[in-house]
Image (cartoon, grey):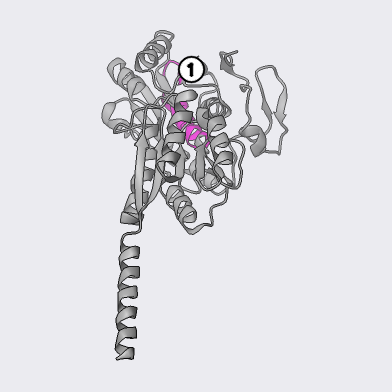
């Protein structure tokens, strides 16, 4: 009788434990982006990473998404609300969220953060950046190959080091395939402003540009203008060729899926470390897609070889000799610009028309 009672108690206990495990709440993961999540663009690529986490972890995760969040007080409020709602992992999808994100991480060591383009890390605050300059170097080679007006136009978002490096990579590459080319820049100081993006694109076309670059505009606005005006365009983040089937020369895209999945798994396991992750062509975080069919076999071969050389580190985008607009040597012959200077870049290479905004 006593044994039966013990066995019955054990069965009840095991049943309660099983029910408790079955009822375990999913881990909440928050995602904040500065622009709307659409079918293309930076926010779309962030959301693909979120979807990859959901696919990998199923009912063990619940994701919370807030898009169109302005940098500053609004972003801080959203972060705090996510933490109040129980988020244990938060993805900050804008450079401008850095200070508020770092402050929240220090105040909430139980929450792990990953932040786009940041430059400081703590135990629970990691940063991630794409070496998009490698992809735009390839796009620059193609632009120099196809331009007939010898004028290239760049519509650029903010003059943060990441974007400045991309502008410089384009200029270096264009001048390899078209030494006579002029390269002009319009800074719009926004990640998401379709009217301003279109206005900048049209202004550059009016100045003779027959190839445009859209750097970190989270809409296909520049691509739409390029298609309508019958010029070429290389865009950022997603394949936007459906918006410009005749205009898109190439799309420099980002793939965050594996990085997001691995980071969330570490947060769940308690092994998360706030490190700086910088991925490029070699890691697959940067991929150049939607190459125009109008490129010749010889041109494609040249670009493919350049891509292989960059991915294997046989070549480097910022290889010396390298000078800025003032003639100052930034990298000597036989040397490469180091990472800390690439990701802190606040100068333009020689041969560019335009300047950095004050």
Q: Quadrant of residue 45?
A: top left
Left or right, 154 with respect to 168, comes to left
2 vs 27, nearest the viewer:
2
The residue sitting at the front extreme is 1
Residue drawn at x 55%, y 44% as measured from the top left: 126
Q: Is residue 70 visible?
A: yes
Secondary structure mainly formed by the magenta segment: helix
Q: Is residue 291 above or below residue 352?
A: below
Q: Position of residue 4 (x, y in %)?
A: 29, 88
Q: Position of residue 334 (x, y in %)?
A: 71, 39
Q: Quadrant of residue 215?
A: top left
Identify the residue under disc 1. Answer: 189
Left or right, 194 with respect to 268, comes to left
Q: Position of residue 15 (x, y in %)?
A: 30, 72
Q: Is residue 110 above or below residue 35?
A: below
152 vs 74, nearest the viewer:
74
287 vs 124, nearest the viewer:
124
151 vs 57, nearest the viewer:
57
* The magenta segment: 133-155
Q: How many marks?
A: 1
């Amino acid at each position: 009788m006593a044994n039966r009672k013990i066995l019955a108690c054990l069965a009840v206990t095991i049943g309660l434990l099983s029910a408790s495990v079955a009822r375990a709440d999913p881990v909440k993961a928050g995602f904040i982006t500065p622009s709307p999540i659409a079918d293309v663009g930076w926010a779309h690529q962030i959301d693909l990473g979120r979807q990859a986490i959901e696919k990998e972890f199923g009912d063990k995760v619940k994701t919370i998404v807030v898009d169109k969040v302005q940098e500053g007080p609004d972003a801080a409020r959203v972060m705090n609300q996510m933490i109040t709602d129980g988020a244990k992992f938060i993805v900050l999808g804008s450079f401008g969220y850095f200070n508020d994100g770092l402050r929240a991480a220090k105040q909430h060591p139980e929450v792990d953060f990953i932040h786009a383009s940041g430059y400081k890390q703590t135990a629970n605050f990691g940063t991630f950046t794409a070496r998009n300059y490698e992809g735009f170097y390839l796009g620059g080679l193609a632009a120099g190959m196809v331009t007939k007006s010898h004028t290239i136009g760049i519509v650029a978002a903010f003059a943060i080091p990441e974007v400045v490096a991309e502008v410089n990579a384009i200029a270096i590459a264009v001048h390899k395939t078209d030494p006579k080319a002029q390269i002009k820049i319009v800074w719009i100081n926004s990640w998401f402003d379709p009217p301003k993006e279109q206005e900048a694109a049209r202004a550059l076309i009016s100045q003779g540009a027959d190839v445009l670059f859209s750097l970190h505009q989270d809409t296909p606005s520049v691509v739409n203008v390029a298609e309508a005006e019958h010029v070429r365009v290389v865009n950022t983040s997603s394949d936007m060729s459906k918006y410009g089937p005749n205009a898109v020369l190439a799309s420099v895209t980002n793939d965050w899926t594996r990085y997001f999945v691995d980071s969330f798994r570490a947060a769940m396991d308690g092994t998360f470390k706030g490190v700086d992750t910088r991925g490029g062509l070699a890691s697959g975080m940067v991929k150049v897609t939607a190459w125009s069919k109008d490129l010749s076999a010889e041109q494609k071969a040249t670009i493919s070889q350049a891509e292989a050389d960059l991915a294997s580190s046989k070549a480097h985008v910022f290889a010396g000799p390298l000078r800025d607009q003032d003639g100052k040597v930034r990298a000597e012959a036989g040397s490469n610009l180091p990472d800390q200077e690439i990701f802190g870049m606040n100068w333009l290479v020689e041969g560019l028309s335009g300047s950095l905004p004050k």
